[in-house]
Amino acid sequence: MTAQIPAHNLSVDQTIAAISAQPQPRVSQAEMEQAVRTLLLGLGEDPDREGLRDTPKRVVKALQFLTSGYHQSLDELLNGAVFHEDTDEMVLVRDIDLFSSCEHHILPILGRAHIAYIPNGKVIGLSKIARICEMYARRLQVQERLTQQIANALQGLLKPQGVAVVVESTHICMVMRGVQKPGSWTVTSSMQGIFAEDAKARQEFMSLIRHNPSFH
Ligand SMILES: Nc1nc2c(ncn2[C@@H]2O[C@H](COP(=O)(O)OP(=O)(O)OP(=O)(O)O)[C@@H](O)[C@H]2O)c(=O)[nH]1
Ligand SMILES: [Zn+2]
């Protein structure tokens, strides 16, 4: 959606429309299950043995859940929870659990997100920040795009003074296969508005997400 029009130039309605665009499935459930059956055969397995008999159905169902973010509507998700509020202090929701799927291997990306904005007359229901994060996580992703999409959505919806998003995660495709580096973390960020322009605002955000909460 950001290819032609920068997110900060989109109206709220345009943002919702862009974010809610739903790709239509072009193949049937049966064809998808058949494809999983073929994969099992290719792996040298017997898809008719008891333990695997329902696996194609389960795999398709699991993948559909893990990509259900394509079919979510931001409008429904928001449920009207954008409120006029006269505050210009930073709002930060940190340590949001994040489970996504890498688009190169369809393997999990596991991590957390820290999302902040500085309002400009409007605030959003706090849970909706985590829901926006989930909506984008439940798609085939690269971490950079996921981070950017979360930031763009908040920017488009609230037109705040600034948005900051940091995603820290581990890619199972780098842990269990390929380069096999358990313990590696990938950190991506998207800084918009005041967070991009003002080092002090950015530093405040960074120090708040580094600080260990005392209620753990
Ligand atoms: N930038 C970026 N790269 C990712 C992400 N998830 C996976 N990748 C990388 O995508 C690349 C795909 O590289 P390829 O050489 O085509 O695939 P591959 O042979 O499976 O690569 P290896 O993982 O190095 O074995 C790998 O370097 C992955 O680590 C992501 O979220 N962002
Ligand atoms: Zn991968």
Image: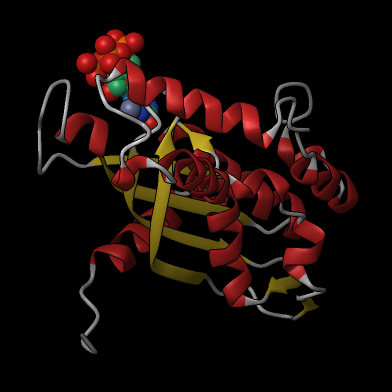
Residue at 26% x, 26% y is 45
Vertical order, 45 against 163 (above or below): above
Q: Position of residue 114 (x, y in %)?
A: 41, 60
Question: Is residue 212 shown above or below 77?
Answer: below
Q: From this view, report whether residue 117 is shown above or below residue 178.
A: below
Question: Height in image: 160 above or below 208?
Answer: above
Judged from this view, the residue extending furthest toward the top is: 42
Q: Nearer the viewer, residue 206 or 187?
A: 187
In the rendered image, residue 210, in percent from the top left (x then y), is placed at: 24, 63
Give the quarter of the figure containing the N terminus.
top right
Which residue reaches farthest front?
49
Residue 87 in percent (x, y) is at 66, 79
* Residue 13 located left or right of residue 137: right
Residue shown at the point (66%, 55%) measured from the top left? 154
Number of marks in picture: 0
Q: Residue at x 59, y 64 (%)?
A: 131
Query: Quick check: which quadrant has ligand 2?
Result: top left
In which quadrant is the C terminus drawn?
Answer: bottom left
How is the protein colored in the picture?
A: secondary structure
Is any part of residue 151 visible from this angle? no
Residue farthest to the bottom? 215
Q: 160 or 18: nearer the eye?
A: 18
In this picture, residue 26 sits left or right of residue 150 = right
- Tell me the quarter of the picture where residue 103 sits: top left
Position in image of residue 85 (x %, y %):
75, 81
Asked whether residue 107 appears in the rendered view, the answer is yes
**Residue at horizontal 82 percent and vertical 50 percent from the top:** 16
Please name whichever residue, 130 or 64, is drawn nearer the observer in this view of the structure: 64
